[in-house]
């Protein structure tokens, strides 16, 4: 049986935005957190794609990401406020033409590498909830392309957090191994835009 890996290709915010996200995550009610807090091991990020990929095809996947990102310039990211869906809370990111186009290009580039059937073993340290497996397996159908809604997940809460609008430049993209709660746990490769 071929081993699968839960992969997220994501924009990583610069240090000041990363710190802001970690601080906001820490302010969410502890009794609602379900164990998810952003920190140095649970990286704030803006997902561009999520897939189950074969471990033996990972180098080819990363080369395709490399080709897609080659020559791309940094993205201007506008956080418009706080948001939530279900029990998850996040920073809402404006869906600009630039981020939409990059998302769609990566989704198309990696389509041939998507594999069904990822279980807990596909996730970092073999830890995943059923919701995590279902989310990654259904990402293309339920959360991509016309349904793509960029955001920075902060954790869980019954109300959206207060987030004042701000803008930043995203220069870093990373391929990350997903962990429980579809958090970015380990950077497999990173790229600088521009």
Image (tube, grey):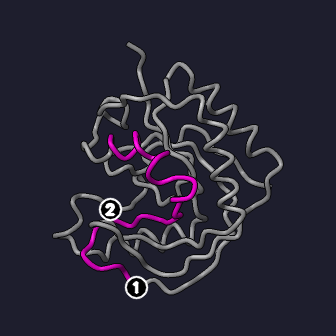
Q: Which residue is outermost to the right?
A: 71
Q: Give the quadrant of the C terminus.
A: bottom right
| Res 19 label | none
Q: Residue at x 62, y 30 (%)?
A: 61
In this view, 150 is above or below 117: below
- Find residue 150 and report its horizontal and vertical position in percent: 53, 63
The local secondary structure at tag 2 comes to loop
Q: Give the quadrant of the N terminus.
A: top left
The local secondary structure at tag 1 comes to loop
Magenta residue check for 152: yes
Instruction: Using the numbered discs, state the Cα–Cα distance from disc 2 to disc 1 in whole angstroms.
Output: 17 Å
- Find residue 57 and report its horizontal and vertical position in percent: 57, 22
Residue beneath label 2, please? 37
Q: Earlier in the sequence, mark 2 or mark 1?
A: 2
| Quarter of the rendering containing residue 118 | top left
In this view, 53 is above or below 74: above
Q: How many other residues sit within 10 Å of disc 2, few (<14), some (14-19) or many (≥20)?
A: many
Q: Residue at x 36, y 28 (%)?
A: 117
Horizontal relation, residue 178 to residue 103: left or right: left
Horizontal relation, residue 128 to residue 39: left or right: left
Q: Residue at x 23, y 58 (%)?
A: 35
Range covered by the magenta-colored residues: 133-161
Q: Residue at x 59, y 82 (%)?
A: 166
Residue beneath label 1, please? 162
Q: How many marks?
A: 2
Q: Nearer the viewer, residue 135 or 147?
A: 147
Residues at badges 2 and 1 in contact (C-beta under 8 Å)? no
- Find residue 27 and report its horizontal and vertical position in percent: 31, 77
| Quarter of the rendering containing residue 21 | bottom left
Q: How many other residues sit within 10 Å of disc 1, few (<14), some (14-19) or many (≥20)?
A: few
Magenta residue check for 31: no
């Amino acid at each position: 049986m071929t081993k699968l890996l839960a992969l997220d290709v994501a924009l990583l915010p610069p240090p000041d935005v990363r710190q802001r996200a970690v601080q906001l995550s820490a302010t969410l009610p502890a009794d609602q957190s379900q164990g998810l807090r952003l920190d140095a091991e649970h990286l704030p990020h803006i997902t561009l794609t999520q897939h189950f990929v074969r471990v033996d095809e990972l180098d080819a996947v990363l080369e395709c990401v490399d080709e897609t990102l080659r020559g791309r310039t940094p993205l201007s990211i506008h956080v418009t406020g706080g948001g939530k869906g279900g029990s998850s809370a996040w920073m809402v990111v404006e869906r600009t033409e630039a981020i939409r186009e990059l998302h769609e290009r990566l989704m198309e580039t990696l389509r041939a590498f998507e594999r069904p059937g990822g279980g807990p073993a596909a996730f970092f340290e073999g830890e995943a909830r059923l919701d995590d497996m279902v989310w990654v397996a259904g990402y293309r159908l339920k959360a991509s392309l016309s349904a793509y809604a960029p955001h920075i997940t902060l954790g869980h809460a019954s109300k959206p957090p207060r987030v004042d609008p701000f803008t930043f430049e995203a220069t870093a993209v990373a391929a990350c191994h997903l962990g429980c709660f579809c958090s970015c746990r380990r950077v497999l490769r990173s790229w600088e835009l521009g």
